[in-house]
Amino acid sequence: MNPGPSGGVSRGVRHRTRHPALLAILLGVPLLVLAACGDADPTGAPAAAATIPAGGPLLLPTATGLASVEAASGTVAFEAPGAKASPDGSVVVRGVIRADGSTRLTWLDPVDGRPIARVRLDEPASLRVVAADGRVAVGPPDVPVTGLIYPVARAQSPVSVVAPDGTVHTYPLPGSVEPEAFSTDGSGLFVLSYTPAGNPTEYQVNRLDLESGEIGGVYGQDSADERQERMGGTARTQVWAPDGSTVYTLYTQEVDGRATSFIHVLNLDEGWAFCLDLPEPLGWDTPAALAVAPGGGRLWVTEAAGHGAVVDTDTLEVVATGDFPSPGAYGLAAVADGDRVFVGSESEIAVLDGTDLHQLARWRTTRPIIGLRRDDLDERLVAVTDGQLTTFPLDAPERDPAGRDLPYTSPLVVIDPTLPTAECAC
């Protein structure tokens, strides 16, 4: 999910919505079960926020790239314009287009920003995907480094896969194509193919074989005959499984004039995709956030209006829904520690029970929340705000504990990576 990928979905991929009557009762609203993933125009693909390596820095998205910040002190170790991180935060790569039209890729130490390796490309390019094995996928320099990737009209999309040892493989892909994520075995690159190429309104998830250069289809979980078809939808936000094997993307679509949502699941181990419909009113037009358990077995969907759902990632079922007092409509973010889910918006954090999403406590910050992170080494929750971090011990017994404010040691403009920085080009 690339720090800026999106998952595509298809009518050819089987949906699963379990116990619709129970879900409707829990939410107290009618439930619309989708027969397909929808036909809305794609407007972008969300950026996956980098996670925290155990004991390592916070890699925070800025208006121009990434910054590395020490969670215990607020010390800004370095800021790297044009940089992206792997989903696990272990690899940071900066891309700079030089005056002569060439591109310089620099691999940085995620702790102190020290250059580790450099590769020069003859053509201008921008980063799309950074993998935990150090490889990157780059594409044409016509989309922003930060924010959401969006479809661009193109007759051809040259995509290059570059390793820190200088190995470069270039694939002249026809039409408008955007890299999505590497397969976990490293043999393939999942891509979004937008159509029509001159005015993108639909997309299809495909797999590029990195040895042969051929593009093949992505199929359903249980059948090799259910290839994903071209479709449309709006990616809202995204989270990766802790082991990097799966990408979960929240989509909103319009069906018969009504906005509905689903989670698109892309398995990078086995190469299948799946759509899980969400009960109304989850994921409409209010800000929404996803959180995944450290062990990967549970996924939570929450939204600013105060609705949520619990998903079993093994069975791909919605196992519970719940309501909680809305923390507000700004800067929604979520993170989980296994038993609880923390939902931050505006300047409040709702601490929710991970089983049924009822509110356990309410924590407050002194500034509007941009994002939430877990500091696994010191067992703290870190609220990323404008100009500072605010930390809370995860074992805080108080219902309203005082957070510790840690101002950044140098000026830093942190952004919400899921907000678009440009309009859809379709």
Image (cartoon, rainbow, N blue to C red):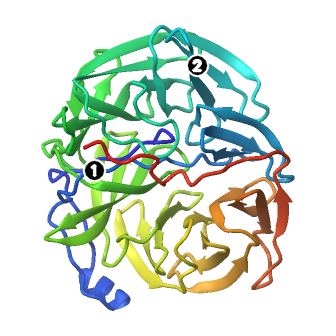
Q: Does dot 2 land on a helix, a strand or a loop?
A: strand
Q: Residues within 10 Å of mark 2 (few under 14, many from 20)?
A: many
Q: Where is residue 12? Give x, y as percent.
A: 15, 50
Measured from the top left, where is residue 422 in percent x and y? 41, 46
State whether residue 397 appears in this view: yes
22 relative position to 255: left or right? right
Pick the front one: 182 or 391: 391
Image check: 149 left or right of 114? left
The residue at the point 14 percent across, 65 percent down is: 35
CB contact under 8 Å: marks 2 and 1: no
Q: Quadrant of the C terminus?
A: top left
Q: Is residue 277 above or below residue 86?
A: below
- Tag 2: amino acid: Leu
- Name the residue that disc number 1 marks: 42
Q: Is residue 35 above or below residue 80?
A: below
Question: Is residue 299 among what the camera can see?
Answer: no
User: Residue 105 — which label?
Assistant: 2
Q: Earlier in the sequence, mark 2 or mark 1?
A: 1
Q: Residue at x 79, y 64 (%)?
A: 391
Q: Quadrant of residue 307?
A: bottom left
